[in-house]
Image (tube, rainbow, N blue to C red):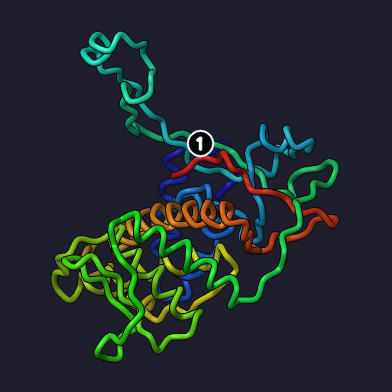
Amino acid sequence: MGKGQVRAEDLHRALDAEISKVRTGSDWARLLDVATLFPTYGFGNVVLINLQMPDASWVARAETWEKLGRRVRTGQAIRILKPLRSRTAMADALKVAGRKYGDEGLVERQVIGFQVGSVYDVTATTGPPIYLPRTPSHSDAVTARALWAGLEKEAASEGFVVEVCATGDASEGYTDYRARRVVVADHLDEFRAVARLAHELGHVRMHSPQVGDGMCREVREVEAESVAYVVLAHHGLWIDAESFDYIRSWAREVDPVEPANVIKATGARVIKVARQLIDATDRHLKEHRAPLGQVPARPLDSAFLAPDLDGPAF
């Protein structure tokens, strides 16, 4: 991508070309790793950030860096896509309620296009170091137990009971939509058990009870395992996902002409659900005073920079 004027169309083409290169499970896992680093950005912008600066560690808008006392080098911008949204007031509801235009719940916001935005990696900024508060270190077992409690609470919020018991076969777990049960096999260790619970919650959030044909099962497994991968990585735990190897084959089955469109849509769905579970588990851990170490940031002059919490999502 050139350094001259960049249009939204250029970014869309670059995004499609990059996603078309996803052929293996390792390719897919690499994008999920990047998504873990940048939890406030949507899948499309995660791909664009990684394309332009694979070594980026923390990115933020110029205004955010300025608030933190750092200045950006404008020639080192990373280009992303910012959604343009329409604001349509519901006139009848406004008249009845006697409320002003813009009140919450009375305005529809729809994406009508995209424009080019700029963010900057910490290495493209200068200024005083910024320190993050130290978080206590925990063993993987302690992390897994605390995360389990948070995910179990989230399952309950969806009306599902989590049971640890024999599955009757070699499977690690399943979701029983009719009985509203999430079953995790009792032969798993704490680490695999919490990974499976996150996997099943991915199913709960993303899929209906109807399984569909074989191709659909593969899609579902990749999506659920991807959600688990991102959620656990956020909390410093990592899993190997064998189902990722299916990604190119089922994407081509769904859309033989443009399989990249399927992968892009899957990525957007995965990141949306993973972010919901991350937010929920973070709140749970904060409420119970059990802070966990997250994916470590890269140091710059002994400083650790916080992510852009108000970054655009696409």
Q: Residue 203 sits in which quadrant? A: bottom left
Relative image position of residue 162 (x, y in whole percent): 34, 70
Q: Farthest front residue?
A: 288
- Residue in view at x 44 percent, y 78 percent: 193
- Residue in view at x 30 percent, y 20 percent: 88
Q: Is residue 29 found left or right of 309 in the rendered image?
A: left
Q: As rendered, which of 285 and 200 lies closer to the eye?
A: 285
Relative image position of residue 312 (x, y in whole percent): 51, 40
Q: How many discs appear?
A: 1
Which amino acid, mark 1?
Val
Q: Is residue 313 found left or right of 4 in the rendered image?
A: left
Which residue in the protein does label 1 denote? 116
Q: In this view, does 38 lie above or below 126?
A: below
Q: As rendered, which of 271 and 111 lies closer to the eye?
A: 271
Q: In this view, does 110 lie above or below 123?
A: above
Q: Residues within 10 Å of mark 1 (few under 14, many from 20)?
A: some
- Residue in view at x 56 percent, y 43 percent: 79
- Residue in view at x 45 percent, y 38 percent: 8
Look at the numbered disc 1 and give the secondary structure of its residue: strand
Q: As rendered, which of 120 and 107 lies closer to the eye?
A: 107
Q: Is residue 12 found left or right of 191 in the rendered image?
A: left
Relative image position of residue 314 (x, y in whole percent): 44, 44
Relative image position of residue 85 (x, y in whole percent): 38, 29
Q: Is residue 281 found left or right of 185 in the rendered image?
A: right
Q: Residue 267 sits in which quadrant? A: bottom left
